Image (tube, helix red, strand yellow):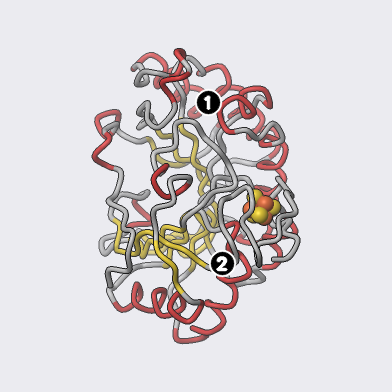
Amino acid sequence: MERCTLCPRECGANRVTGRGFCGESETVRIARAELHMWEEPPISGKNGAGTVFFCGCTLRCCYCQNHEISHGGKGFELTVEELSETFLRMQELGAHNVELVTPTHFTPQIIEALDMAGERLNVPVVWNSGGYDKPETLRMLGGRVKIFLPDLKYASADIAQKYSQAGDYPDAAFASLREMCRIAGKPVIENGVMKSGVIVRHMILPNHRRDSIELIRRLREEFSPDDLLVSLMCQYTPMYMAGEFREINRRLSRFEYETVAEELERSGFDGFFQERTSAKEEYVPEFFSEKYF
Ligand code: SF4
């Protein structure tokens, strides 16, 4: 924490005395912890995912739907003990898993909290990140995380730099995806609920279907269809600072979605196609500034 290099940005911030590019110090902050029904079917199952939304982010996506907590400062502090209790509370509520949303910059604190819960926590842990992870940091997790649910946002470094201030995103995301597949193995789903494996999420941006197609082709070059599942998302809504970029300041068209969906079908990967009707702002959960449980 005194010279943080947890994510590919490696900004080297002293998080004991200050904050990193991700906006966070060494103290854990979250903005919501509840059962969540809107993830992919085997993640939410019938009871819901036990979702914990962490504050801060190592990326700067101009269209971030969670900008209130990723960059806006909303959220509240938890001790590592309280974080551990929060994980156990998700399990008590009946969650099929403990889903860590945007966890990368709190990896050491999460490991400590999971170790405190120990064998009392017997549902799988889901790592839901923006895909901007480092293999070395993922290896720190040991066997504690069974399911990885990373974004895979861009094939082009220029686009990654323009919209997320991370020109190294494509190579970093593919390197971390290889490590995630090595750690979690091939997808295992029992009675409709995921037990282990990797689901890659890709959200298509308006006017960028060619980048999505290139991304799927690279994915197919580097992975076999049975290595992972793919979740194709079309809920893009121009939010936060997206209005500064005319080309992404609209919703996705049916043509754009179908063109990318056809490429994904051709690739042979199995997975999930999000309904276009779910592209609504109201799917963004409410976040909290003070501890509410
Ligand atoms: S996790 Fe945060 S502090 Fe650490 S290297 Fe990444 S941006 Fe910097």
Q: Position of residue 30 (x, y in %)?
A: 42, 62
Say whether residue 216 is left or right of residue 157.
Answer: left
The relative height of residue 213 versus residue 69 in the rendered view (above or below) is above
Nearest the viewer among 287 and 155 is: 287
| Closer to the eye: label 2 or 1 | 2
Q: Could you say which quadrant of the image residue 144 lies in?
A: bottom right
Residue behind mark 1: 266
Residue behind mark 2: 145
Q: Residue at x 49, y 41 (%)?
A: 201
Q: Amino acid at mark 1?
A: Arg
The relative height of residue 293 versus residue 226 in the rendered view (above or below) is below
Question: Would you say the beta carbon of the disc 1 residue lies within 8 angstroms of ligand 1?
Answer: no
The N terminus sits in image quarter: bottom right
Q: Earlier in the sequence, mark 2 or mark 1?
A: 2
The relative height of residue 113 versus residue 174 in the rendered view (above or below) is below
Mark 1 Cα-neighbour bin, 10 Å: few <14, some 14–19, many ≥20: few
